[in-house]
Image (cartoon, rainbow, N blue to C red):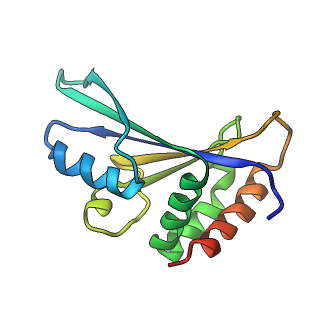
Amino acid sequence: MNENIQVSLEASFILNATEDEEKLVRCISEFIGTNKLSRVVVKGYYGNLMHIITMAITKNRAEVIIGKILNMISEEDIESIMTSLGKSIDKNGNLHLRIDKQSILEGSLRLSERDPLKMKIIPRQAKPISRNWPEWYRLRLAYLQKQYRE
């Protein structure tokens, strides 16, 4: 692709009190390829403490992770991503994906809306330009899937 737009990736998830913090953070850190994280503690609806964990990955490493994700999820999940691009891209051109946290612990990946690892793919542009983001992502994701095929 001749696009000069690089991407970064932000991954975040809620660590519930019932989850094994060490195991989940270690497993997701290994999957993402970083142990640099930020943590915010908030009170849940019933007064329980929850931790919001966020990790950031930039440039080339972000593309490797995106390619890895695309090669680990099912063809049905890829089709779901491609057909819902219009709904999954925000006004700033960021693509939002949700991956089942438990599937990462199991060594596989699947999309999930319930208690997910939220992945935000952020295009980095020198200057903001108007763009057909769904089409750009359709081409970019296909390229990354092929580029990082295992």
**Residue 137 locus on image (x, y percent):** 71, 57
Q: Is residue 105 left or right of residue 97?
A: left
Q: Residue at x 70, y 35 (%)?
A: 92
Q: Quadrant of the N terminus?
A: bottom right
Question: In the image, residue 122 lies at what x, y percent?
Answer: 63, 42
Q: Quick one: 50 or 129, which is closer to the camera? A: 129
**Residue drawn at point x = 59 percent, y = 57 percent:** 63
Q: In the image shown, does 25 or 136 lie closer to the viewer?
A: 25
Q: Is residue 34 left or right of residue 120?
A: left
| Apparent side of residue 59 relative to residue 93 in the rendered image (left or right) | left
Question: Left or right: 4 with respect to 48?
Answer: right
When asked about the image quadrant of residue 72, the answer is bottom left
Q: Height in image: 28 above or below 92?
A: below
Give me the residue at 21% from left, 38% from top: 16
Give the residue at x 18% y 42%. 21
Labels in figure, total: 0
Q: Position of residue 59 (x, y in %)?
A: 61, 48
Residue 101 lies, in percent from the top left, at 32, 54
Which of the 4 quarters of the picture holds residue 134? bottom right
- Asked if 89 appears above or below 17 in the picture, the reply is below
